[in-house]
Amino acid sequence: MSDVEQVPAVSPFHDHLPIGERLDASALTEGLPWAFDEIRMRPLEPMLVPEKPRGGETDPSECRPCMPSPGTIWQDDHWQVRVMSDPSGLPFMAAISPREHWLLEDAPMDVLAGLGPLMQCLSEAVKSIPGVARCHFGRWNDGSAHLHLWALARPAGMMQGRGAALAFWDDVLPPIPQEMADEHARIVAESLAVGWGEVFPNR
Ligand SMILES: [Zn+2]
């Protein structure tokens, strides 16, 4: 892919953008004043296509979510919930993905049908962690081609973590101790397994 020449993307939207300019970010500090005092944007970079392939996009045999992982805290026939190997700042964060290599574009209906019940149960499981008020879900589609969503635990009373700002706080808050991360993963896994599925299949 590295030898594919990238060219600027062309569309009416791209044509109206001030590429190269440093844009005013006050909409972020006014819109999310509970999280940001000041933000300085980098100059708007050229938007080149074709984009570099995502993980598992050109060679699904190298797709990480397709491989067994000790980070898998729960799975059923179609879906798995995984935590990262190193704790981060939020009380809990996990990826939800199909066990087989599906994209959102091609996942079969019998797989997709299991996502709603899993999101409902996972949200309740995350909220059962001490000190957690809400479970947020994010679907960012840029790192891995394999369909995945993120579940993020919003600490109780943390009004600075409302909405999309919560994902930034995960990198900013001090990482939680490994023992606490393990305990929170156990709480979520065992809560999910009350409904169905198995816990820690690769440990
Ligand atoms: Zn995959």
Image: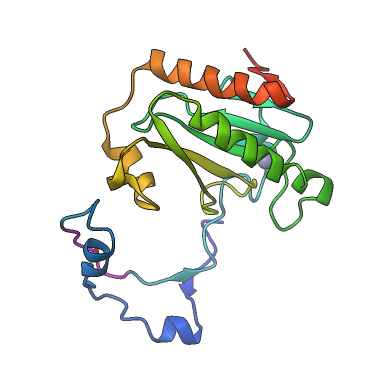
In the rendered image, residue 61, in percent from the top left (x then y), is placed at: 70, 38
The correct choice, above or below, for 19 with respect to 124 in the image is: below
Tell me which segment is drawn in magenta: 38-44
Q: Nearer the viewer, residue 170 or 102?
A: 170
The correct choice, above or below, for 164 with respect to 171 in the image is: below
Majority secondary structure in the magenta region:
loop
Q: Quadrant of the N terminus?
A: bottom right
Picture residue at 69% right of the left edge, 21% below the top = 194
Residue 69 seen in the figure: no
Q: Nearer the viewer, residue 58 or 133?
A: 133
Picture residue at 27% right of the left edge, 63% below the top = 28
The correct choice, above or below, for 180 with respect to 150 in the image is: above
Residue 32 seen in the figure: yes
Q: Quadrant of the C terminus?
A: top right
In the rendered image, residue 168, in percent from the top left (x then y), is placed at: 33, 46
Picture residue at 63% right of the left edge, 50% below the top = 57
Q: Nearer the viewer, residue 190 or 85?
A: 190
Picture residue at 52% right of the left edge, 63% below the top = 51
